[in-house]
Amino acid sequence: MPTLRPTLNLGILAHVDAGKTSLTERLLLSAGVIDVLGSVDSGSTQTDSLELERRRGITIKSAVVSFTVHTPAGDTVVNLIDTPGHPDFIAEVERVLGVLDGVVLVVSAVEGVQAQTRVLFRTVRRLGLPVIVFVNKTDRAGADVPAVLAQIRARLGAPVVPMPVGDCAVDVLTGQDDDLLTAFVDGSLSDAMVQGSLRRQSRAGTVLAAYAGSAITGDGVDALLAALPGLLPSRCPAVDAPLSGVVFKVERGGNGEKIAYTQILAGCLRVRDRIPVRGADAKVTAIQVFDDGTAVPRNSVEAGRIAKVWGLTDVRIGDAIGEYRATMGQLFAPPTLETVVVPDAADRTAVHTALTQLAEQDPLINLRQDDVRGELYLSLYGEVQKEVIQTTLTEQYGVAVTFRETTMICAERVVGVGAAVEHIYRNPFLATVGLRVEPGTPGSGVTVRLDVPVETMPLFVYKAVDVFRDALEQTVRETLQQGLRGWRVEDVVVTLTDCDYNSPGTTAGDYRKLVPMVLMEALRQAGTVVCEPVHRLTIEGPADTLSAVLRLLAQHGAVPYAPVPAGPAFELTADVPAAEVHAVQQRLPAVTRGEGVLEAEFDHYRPLRGRAPERARTDLNPLHRKEYLLHVLRRV
């Protein structure tokens, strides 16, 4: 079976209000898939389809649209994914990055490199994704393209080649291309050699080609569109390979059915196919493929395309389709804020159902239910996200809620070494489990190790040790979501030190039920300290407002570092508790005459001084042996 046309999965990334969605709209017009240019202000764009997005004028959910770029070298199908620019919706960006081949980073010609620009660029660099820059809003008063390109070089630390290619491009390109440098020195340099080096280095992500123009007027957009297939790497997936794909977005249809946004990397997926999803077969009932600006019903979707798939009832974001095995991990810091949802008494069940569906679309909101108090908890990146959730619940689900004051999500760190063991016949389960807990290195998360001889393991374990380790790790991670004081335990090493069984009666369930009890006792022996999340702020402002900024930071518990003078301005970094970031952001314009610029990013956890706050548990504490066993045995 022949291969398909080359495809390019393209992400449009930017700080909020840089013109990302307007550029997407203009690209669609230039590609011929729409006849009339939509407007963010009027709410008529293709990708901002939610009423809430149109009303607020911001992108909240990622959106997919497909078009074809025609070049003398052939056609390339571009699957373009528009992403949110507001930092409160960074989780939506994270889910998209894993399916991209390249990125267009939009930077305002007036505001220049902004806080979210830097966060996004560092992340795509870490992933090795090639980037093209589009300096937007050149039609606006105050636009300064050379100054913005200088900012990109200085603040992003990236070599930039202004387009169209000029003399200065050779200086940039020869710095990383010895053959080009040799040709330059011996006088044999040609335009074709320069263009070839630019294509190679751009696709490899070592230089940034920078276009400038206006998404509103269309200036520069045609040139950007034509350059996409040459400057970013496309793929030629074969349909005769085994099925492989990944689900990167989940939403609900008008009848409440799940719709899985799926990238097909290889093979072909057809209506009525049965595929494994979370341990059970699911039947594909319908497919829509993104093609020429819209999603059209099809009986199948081939490699290289992105489709909406119906029928995968239990599917979640990140699930594999077929033989897909790659994993991206978490790219951005988890949410550091939390709120309690308070529904009207009559709407309690409806609110839980609605929030469960929202958690399917955004797993990082981490919906938790306290069965004892009847309370629901949500994790957040910021106040705007909370407002959007509240509005969505009211308008989309018809339920009214209020939120309690946003608080920090703390963490617990192990301070010593602890060990515990539960022997077979001395507990209700046909198993022995011994665990040791000790501190891990900062940023290491949860590490699980096996330190027992295989002969102490049941037959079903040592024939599949990797499966057992994965199951053990999953149970350990779930248990450590609530430590001694109710907070998630970070940076810890858990080692299985003892294991026994009673053949043939012992099952995997015996270990799953016993591990939480042993783990929490080992944790109690080790001890923990509660830590608060700390954000690193970078603030720029007029030099004469530095004293006022320092006073503002002191009022919110920040620890500033030495400011760096920059002519008539200053740059300052400071560590501030996550709970205070929003207040600093709100008050900064007043003390800097509206000229202050702030970038905030999670940096680390630090031990809290004074009495450590406790978080109400949402389950029965395995440390309370009798209650835990009664609960588990009743459930069995």
Image (cartoon, helix red, strand yellow):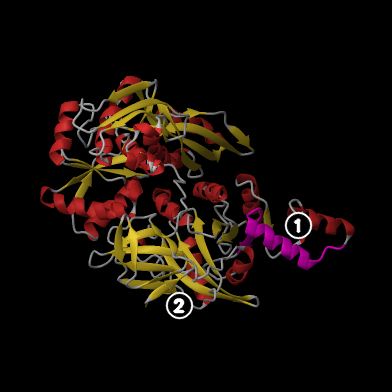
**Which residue is located at x 35 percent, y 40 percent?**
461
585 on left or right of 352? right
Q: Quadrant of residue 271?
A: bottom left
Q: On screen, 14 above or below 196?
A: above
Q: Is residue 224 visible?
A: no
Q: Which of 465/27 is in front?
A: 465
Q: Which mark is residue 36?
A: 2
Image point (47%, 46%), residue name = 331
Is residue 411 one of those drawn in magenta? no
> Magenta residues, as a range?
188-212
For this orientation, the residue located farthest to the right is: 186
Q: Is residue 209 magenta?
A: yes
Query: Which quadrant, please, contains the C terminus?
Result: top left
Q: Name the side, left or right, on which 179 lies relative to 61.
A: right
Residue 630 % position (x, y): 14, 33
Q: Secondary structure at mark 2?
A: loop
| Image position of 380 with respect to 325: above or below | above
Query: Label 2 is placed on what type of residue?
Result: Val
Residue 426: image x %, image y %? 21, 25
Q: What residue is disc 1 on? A: 168
Residue 90 locus on image (x, y percent): 42, 50
Residue 97 location (% of width, % of height)? 48, 55
Q: Name which quarter of the figure residue 613 lies in.
A: top left
Task: Identify the residue at horizontal 51%, vertical 68% (top origin).
Answer: 216
Q: Earlier in the sequence, mark 1 or mark 2?
A: 2
Three-letter amino acid code at the position of disc 1: Cys
